[in-house]
Image (cartoon, coloured by chain):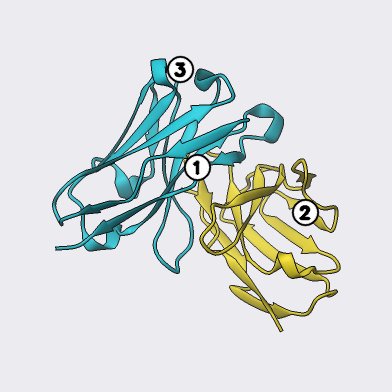
Amino acid sequence: QVQLVQSGAEVKKPGASVKVSCKASGYTFTSYDINWVRQATGQGLEWMGRLNPNSGHTDFAQKFQGRVTITRTTSISTTYMELSSLRSDDTAVYYCARVGGTSSWYALDIWGQGTMVTVSS
Amino acid sequence: DIQMTQSPSSLSASVGDRVTITCRASESIGNYLNWYQQKPGKAPKLLIYAASSLQSGVPSRFSGSGSETDFTLTITSLQPEDFATYYCQQSYSTLYSFGQGTKLEIK
C-alpha cells in the first residue's frame, strides 16, 4: 500500500543539526512532491517546505529559509529533511506528507507517522 | 504568504449535534482549500480537498463549502470518533499554510 515511513526519534543538543528521513513505497516516488510539516507539543501544524523528487527543486517557508535543507535519494525513494542550528523551540514532531497531485488539488493525502525531535542540553 | 484563520479555536458539542468550523484566507485561494482531522498522537488525515470534495473513505456526514476567501467544514450528526482537532490548509500557493486548528471536544 501507499505509505511514508519516517526514521526514529532523535535527541539533539542546542546548536546541533538533525536529519530525518522519509521512505516512500507503493507509488512512483518521483511523481509526487513531498512536504515537511512540524508540530510542537500541544500546538498546531506548521508548514516547513517541499521537495519535487523528480527535479530536486525545493521551496521553504520564510521562517526556515537558510536553516532547513530537503534532499532526496531517488534510488531508495527516500526524502531527507535536515534542520540546523537547533534551538529548544525546535522540539516538535516532524511529519513528511505527500502532495496528492492535480486530482486532489494538491492536498496532502499521505502522511508519515511522525518523528519526535527533542532539543535539550 | 497566505494566512489562514480558523474559528472557533475550540468547540464543545454532543454526540448527534451538527457543528460548523470556519476558515478564512488572507487572499483569494479559489477552491484550493483542504481540511484535515487529527487525533492525539496521530498524523493528520485528509478529509476534504478542493473545498468540498470528500476524500475516499471519509463518511458523508463531513462536508465542506466555500470559495475564494471563506470556507466552512460541517459535521452533521457528530459521532464519538469525530472528537478531534481540525485544520484547514491552502494549496493555492506553493508555500502552503495551515489554520491554527479547532479542537472539537465532547460537551
Side (left or right) of A90 relative to B25: left
Amino acid tagged 2: Gly
Identify the mark at residue A112; answer none if there is no mark: 1
Chain of the residue on which disc 3 is drawn? A
Q: Earlier in the sequence, mark 1 or mark 3?
A: 3
What x and y, as percent, mark residue B96?
Answer: 50, 44
Side (left or right) of B43 relative to B62: left
According to the image, label 2 marks what residue? B64
* CB contact under 8 Å: marks 2 and 1: no
Q: CA distance from mark 2 to mark 1?
A: 25 Å
Amino acid tagged 1: Gly
What x and y, as percent, mark residue B15?
Answer: 81, 76
Q: Could you tell me if residue A94 is visible in this image?
A: yes
Please name whichever residue, A13 or A37, is drawn nearer the observer in this view of the structure: A13
Q: Could you tell me if residue B94 is visible in this image?
A: no
Within the image, what quadrant is residue A98 found in? top right
Quadrant, the C terminus of chain B: bottom right
What x and y, as percent, mark residue B82?
Answer: 72, 65
Q: Who's the residue at 31% across and 46% down the image?
A: A64
Q: Who's the residue at 79% across and 68% down the image?
A: B79
